[in-house]
Image: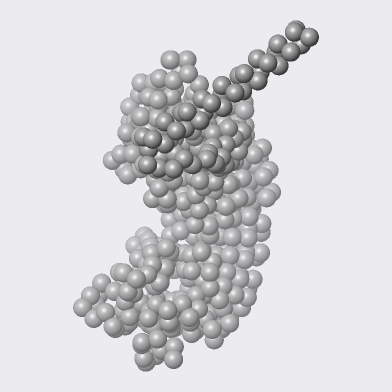
Amino acid sequence: MRSVDGPKIVRQIRYILTAMSSKVHAKRRNAFSDNPRTSFIHSPALDLPYLPTEIWLMILREATTMNSDPLDISLGLSFLETTCEVSEYHASMKTKRDLSLVSKMWNKYMQEYLYEFVWISRASQAKALALTLLTQFIEGKPSSGNYIRRLHMETPVLMRCATDDIRTILDYAPHLVIYSDHHSVRCMRYSEFIDVRCSPEQMVSVLANSNSKLRKLSLTNYSDDPFPKHVSPLLRRTAANLEYLELSSSTIPLVSGHLFASKSPIVSLPVLQSLKLTLDNTTFAVLAAWDMPNLRNVSVVSSDFGYAGPGFAYFFAAHGKKLHQLELGHSSSLVVEHYLSLHPRPVQHIPLAEWCPNLKEFICSADAEWSWQNPDWIAPHVLLPGHKSLEFIGIRDIDKRLMDDASAFPADREDEAPFFPLVEQISSLLFNDAFPSLRYIRDLSRGSHSMRAGQRPETRILKFWAKILARCGERQVWLEDFRGVNITLRDLKRAGLDRIGGAGTLV
């Protein structure tokens, strides 16, 4: 009996002592405190630090999401999509940096999101990133380059990146999906390359490793040699996944297009959908022979105005029937001025509409010139005066055109007379004989949207858009802003147009 009752008695004594101790300490705390004792309430917030890693990653992903996903390739296949702005990128990076400084755990989780999208806007940023990756390698730490999915380089001319810094970044970024170089690498064109790894061939070949997952590629040729000499081997190794390709050149090769095209290897790009070219007539002749069965969208800015050259004709004769969307980057005024200065004889007819019979969308610049041969007609571009199946026309640089025209009458902010040529140019698109299937006209400029719908817009700007909207209504054509949202009478009234009388009135 004693062996059985002993533990029971011990437990009872311990319980009594614990109860007495709690009462004594409670009285002692109440004696030195005026606040009444409150019972402990469990908060769900106390459970947050113990969330699984996967949940934390999802929360941090949502907290740092940009308006448009910079890693979504499908958003950038059409040239109508608005690109990410550097200000939006900086705002997102500030949020990511602040979250990474909350705790060591969050810092670890945020590494992937900090490095997944890198935008280099000056040379010092490229050097800092290259130094970080090299230091991690020397110290045996995990490389942050493994997180880089998109590398975007867009710098001023005097702040271009050093080739060795870019080569270092590429060496430690094996999982790149998007690579964009917009004339942002400082290359030594007229001297020997000190580092063999930084030659044009090596800079291109490093992107084509055995595990390459590139889906969007923008390259600039800094060499005097034709572009395909460097890029063809790369494209053959990355062709399986490549959906968007942008090629630009800083020089015009002197080699003959026919001679080089006959010797250049044929590249097959089975899934390529969008092609943007800022090239010369010689390279167009080479691209005409490439196999691109799924090509749908093409943007062209000929660096030597070679629209009338054989390379341009070969390219569109070979691929024009597949095109759904076409952008011609040079404005009509520049092309006409070039032809007038160098070709005093009449320019030969370029049957672009016949080469692209299935075209549905066309993008041009707002800068067009009067035609002295037909003063009542202003084509959207000198190369495409009309098209039977075209349903959509996008216009870039309307903001620049409005500001240039308005500078002729800076004093009178009520007079819309400076915008008369632009009104007639856009109205010319509504001619049924030229574009019988037209249904949409879109202003692709963010700046003109701010001029129209921002705070305290000018009266003459609102009058201008009222005239455009009225004429589009007569033709039953939708007028859209850069987001693809319809511009309506209510929008203009909200901006203050209901105070205006005369031809632009909405009352």
Give the answer, above or below, for where 84 lies relative to 404: above
Give the answer, above or below, for where 504 lies relative to 16: below
Question: Which is more toward the observer, 425 or 261?
Answer: 425
Image quarter in which the N terminus is found: top right
* Residue occupying the point 65% across, 42% down: 269
* Residue occupying the point 69% across, 49% down: 293
Give the answer, above or below, for where 193 lies relative to 43: above
Q: Quadrant of residue 320?
A: bottom right
Q: Is residue 433 left or right of residue 219?
A: right
* Residue occupying the point 59% across, 23% down: 16
Question: Which is more toward the observer, 93 or 487?
Answer: 93
Q: Is residue 441 left or right of residue 410?
A: right
In the rendered image, the residue lying farthest to the left is: 411
Q: Position of residue 442 (x, y in %)?
A: 51, 69
* Residue occupying the point 53% across, 73% down: 486
Q: Position of residue 5 (x, y in %)?
A: 74, 13
Q: Quadrant of residue 474?
A: bottom right
Question: Which is more toward the observer, 135 or 475?
Answer: 135
Q: Position of residue 473 (x, y in %)?
A: 54, 84
In the rendered image, the residue lying farthest to the top is: 3
